Image (cartoon, helix red, strand yellow):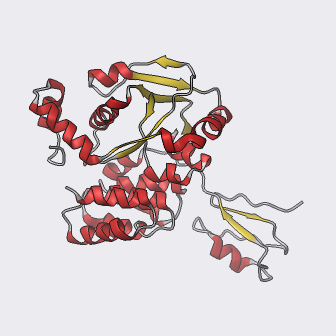
């Protein structure tokens, strides 16, 4: 029986060596688990990040009432992509510019879902020059047709 | 058609049922087994989506990739909440017994035909529609546009 670990964020499957589990803090992640192994993980070891669905307050509500919490959720990687896309959109509602660097990073996420959400978040700041630069790049270079269309439409304001 | 207003263009690009259920048919971790749709003709797609967007306070407006879920399944009357009379009356619910029922529906009836079932309402279409309604003194749109941001016409 292959041991399967189910902390909030990580599940390990098919380990071929014993993995000493150490979750010293709430920010335990794949890196800390890997470092805790007492043998090198073989290439056959596959890491799957398992993140529960967000069931808390709406992201729109958090953006207005608890923007730092929303930012923390995003920055700590505690949202699956299907939630992160909507969190990204909601980050656009944060009234100061503190969310913009985060949105710029999300605009380069490997998930097209997340990048589309970032477009909608950035669309609320389309008068910002840096935002327009990012959206222009996305409108031309993003590999997803949906993201490109969303960026084109966001720029047309 | 039974028009489901899309949330993410990219979800339908991926054609992954898991992703579609999580993004298009779930809210805060709960799957929407009573899926909201609008019973409309093809010519009214822009109207339905524009009212949906306005009624949900979408600002700035944007385009939507929407899907026709009509497959002969019974739909149930359920008053809409957009505040616009057309979509209030056109609103219906498709009801699924459980996640597997919804999954099977998407896998076997919708995704194989997604090319013909997609109906796009672009941002330009929606804004043009809103302008026309105001020009024609449609009271619903006059009231909405008087109170919303400059992102709308």
Taking the view exactly as shown, the residue that stands out farthest to the top is B77
Task: Give me the residue at 29% from left, 22% from top.
Answer: B86
Q: Quadrant of residue A108?
A: bottom left
- A104 left or right of A114 in image: left
Q: Position of residue A34 (x, y in %)?
A: 70, 77
Q: Position of residue A66 (x, y in %)?
A: 36, 53
Q: In which quadrant of the rendered image does the C terminus of chain B lie?
A: top left
Q: Position of residue A15 (x, y in %)?
A: 81, 70
Q: In which quadrant of the rendered image does the N terminus of chain B lie?
A: top left
Q: Is residue A146 visible?
A: yes
Q: In the image, is residue A36 above or below residue A11?
A: below
Task: Give me the residue at 42% from left, 56% from top.
Answer: A146
- Nearer to us in this view, A136 or A90: A136
Q: Quadrant of residue B78?
A: top left
Taking the view exactly as shown, the residue that stands out farthest to the right is A1
- A8 left or right of B91 in image: right
Q: In the image, is residue B138 above or below residue A78?
A: above
Taking the view exactly as shown, the residue that stands out farthest to the front is B116
Count of number-bearing discs: 0
Task: Give me the residue at 26% from left, 43% from top.
Answer: B125
- B53 left or right of A8 in image: left
Q: Is residue A70 visible?
A: no
Q: Position of residue A128 (x, y in %)?
A: 20, 67
Q: Quadrant of residue A124?
A: bottom left
- Nearer to us in this view, A6 or B83: B83
Q: In the image, is residue A52 above or below residue B127?
A: below
- A139 left or right of A10 in image: left
- Nearer to us in this view, B39 or B24: B39
């Amino acid at each position: 029986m292959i041991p399967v670990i189910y902390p909030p964020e990580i599940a390990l499957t098919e380990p071929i060596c014993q993995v000493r589990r150490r979750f010293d803090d709430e920010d335990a992640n794949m890196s800390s688990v890997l470092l805790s192994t007492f043998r090198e993980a073989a290439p056959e070891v596959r890491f799957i990040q398992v993140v529960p669905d967000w069931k808390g307050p709406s992201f729109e509500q958090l953006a207005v009432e608890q923007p730092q919490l929303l930012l923390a959720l995003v920055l700590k990687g505690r949202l699956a992509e299907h939630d992160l896309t909507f969190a990204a959109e909601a980050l656009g509602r944060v009234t100061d510019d503190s969310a913009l660097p985060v949105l710029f990073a999300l605009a380069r996420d490997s998930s097209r879902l997340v990048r589309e959400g970032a477009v909608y978040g950035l669309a609320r700041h389309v008068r910002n020059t840096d935002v327009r630069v990012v959206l222009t790049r996305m409108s031309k270079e993003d590999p997803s047709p949906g993201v490109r269309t969303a960026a084109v439409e966001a720029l047309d304001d | 058609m039974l028009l489901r207003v899309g949330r993410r263009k990219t979800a339908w690009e991926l054609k992954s049922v898991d992703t579609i259920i999580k993004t298009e048919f779930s809210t805060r971790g709960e799957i929407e087994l009573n899926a909201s749709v609008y019973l409309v003709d093809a010519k009214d797609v822009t109207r339905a989506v524009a009212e949906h967007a306005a009624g949900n306070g979408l600002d700035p407006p944007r385009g939507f990739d929407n899907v026709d879920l009509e497959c002969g399944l019974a739909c149930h009357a359920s008053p809409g909440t957009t505040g616009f009379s057309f979509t209030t009356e056109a609103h219906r619910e498709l009801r699924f017994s459980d996640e597997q029922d919804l999954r099977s529906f998407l896998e076997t009836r919708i995704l194989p035909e997604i090319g013909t079932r997609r109906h796009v309402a672009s941002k330009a279409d929606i804004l043009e529609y809103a302008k026309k309604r105001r020009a024609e003194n449609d009271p619903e749109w006059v009231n909405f546009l008087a109170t919303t941001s400059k992102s709308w016409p």
